[in-house]
Amino acid sequence: MVLRLEKAKGIDIFMEETIALIDKLEAESRLSRAEWIALIEGRSPNAAEYLFQKARKWQQRYFGRQIYARGLIEFTNYCKNDCYYCGIRRSNRSAQRYRLTKEEILECCHTGYGLGFRTFVLQGGEDGWFSQEALEEIVHAIKSKYPDCAITLSLGERSYESYLGLFRAGADRYLLRHETADASHYRSLHPPELTLGNRKQCLYWLKEIGYQTGTGFMVGSPGQTAAHLAEDLMFLRELEPQMAGIGPFVPHHETPFAGEPGGTVELTLFLLGLLRLMLPSLLLPATTALGTIDPMGREKGILAGANVVMPNLSPTSVRKKYELYDNKICTGDEAAECWACLNRRMEKIGYELAVSRGDFPDAPARKQ
Ligand code: 5AD
Ligand code: FES
């Protein structure tokens, strides 16, 4: 009996500590490495609920009940890199490779604009086939046709000059996840030619040039510990990106990590909540990967503090081929169905998709 009481008391003390850390995070917007680790390791369903309530309060203070939609155009799945987790890595010989033409990309934008999208995200593998000039021409063509839209690029690591040229051609935002902020963990997820140092350098360049910059990491990638996640959170605190994409690691059958366990919904949601409290105006997507491992994943993401969704605008003929991980959702649906489906899903939980560029609330004026 005494033992039981002691145990119960122990749990209470533990719980009080995590609640106190959540309060501290909200009040001070930062925690020490040791505090982050204690909070992540000490989390419980009750602490998570407490966190999500606060996260929703900040989400609604900045964004109301409007969820920003970004139309994702996956325009090439050729990639010169060989990340161990990624289904479109160059060593995956069974991937069917494709590239969209400029006309096909513009056609995606046309469909998307009609549906209400005001941000287009051009995402691809690191594909040298598209020259700098070709990319600038695509960006320029979209910008001229849709001057009221934001263009986001997600093309991986490039030179300062290349980023600058694309910005001058009309790109507004750039997404480049850092994947993990721990250098040795980074090495265990990537071949030696990719380094955390270069990834971070690219992110600082992007911010310096004036892009609204997004970074992020996978949750539950092989070998990840609470200490690694603490590094990720501290790196985000330092970089202060405008956006952070986090989603669970989902194994892909044709990669070296095929047999590794995937990340969990529970930990992904907890981290979304922490990010919302740390950087309250952050653009935070409820990712497709989260929707893939749980049919209600995106709704749960919104209720944990996320405020962005990124439905697919790629032609249905290529959707299945952009398979970063197994069982990716929405690969058979038309863009219109995706918009309608997500809108319905958002309305069911008291939110709605916004027809808006959905800029970062404190975004600096664009210097040309
Ligand atoms: N599981 C989850 N996310 C993945 N990504 C790549 N492969 C996987 C995977 N197996 C993510 C990476 C990348 C983004 C485009 O997709 O974080 O930055
Ligand atoms: Fe293409 Fe990692 S496999 S960037």
Image: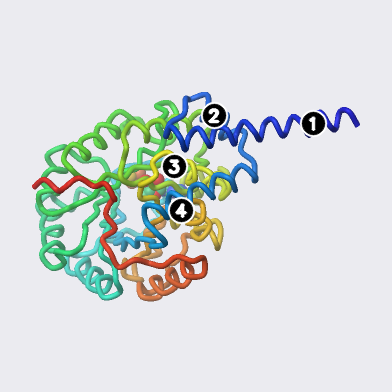
Which amino acid is tagged 4? Tyr
**Mark 4: which secondary structure?**
loop
| Residue picked out by circle 4 | 325
| Residue picked out by circle 1 | 7
For ligand 1, tell me if the residue under mark 3 lies within 8 Å.
Answer: no
Task: Report the Cα–Cα distance between label 2 and label 3.
Answer: 14 Å
For ligand 1, tell me if the residue under mark 1 lies within 8 Å.
Answer: no
Which amino acid is tagged 3? Leu
User: Is mark 2 in CB contact (under 8 Å) with mark 3?
Assistant: no
**Mark 1: which secondary structure?**
helix
Vertical side of 253 occupied by 191: above or below: above
Camera-nearest label, 4 or 3: 3
Question: Would you call the spot at circle 3 few (<14 residues within 10 Å), some (14-19), or many (20 or more)?
Answer: many
User: Is mark 2 in CB contact (under 8 Å) with mark 4?
Assistant: no
First in sequence: mark 1 vs mark 3: 1
| Residue picked out by circle 2 | 37
Which amino acid is tagged 1? Lys
Front in this rendered view, residue 60 or 204? 60
Task: Report the Cα–Cα distance between label 1 and label 2.
Answer: 22 Å
Query: Where does ligand 2 appear, by image quarter?
Result: top left
Question: Would you call the spot at circle 1 few (<14 residues within 10 Å), some (14-19), or many (20 or more)?
Answer: few
Q: Does residue 91 appear in the picture of this structure?
A: no
Task: Report the Cα–Cα distance between label 1 and label 4.
Answer: 41 Å
Per the rendering, the mark at residue 275 is: 3
Task: Report the Cα–Cα distance between label 1 and label 3.
Answer: 31 Å
Question: Would you call the spot at circle 2 few (<14 residues within 10 Å), some (14-19), or many (20 or more)?
Answer: some
First in sequence: mark 1 vs mark 4: 1
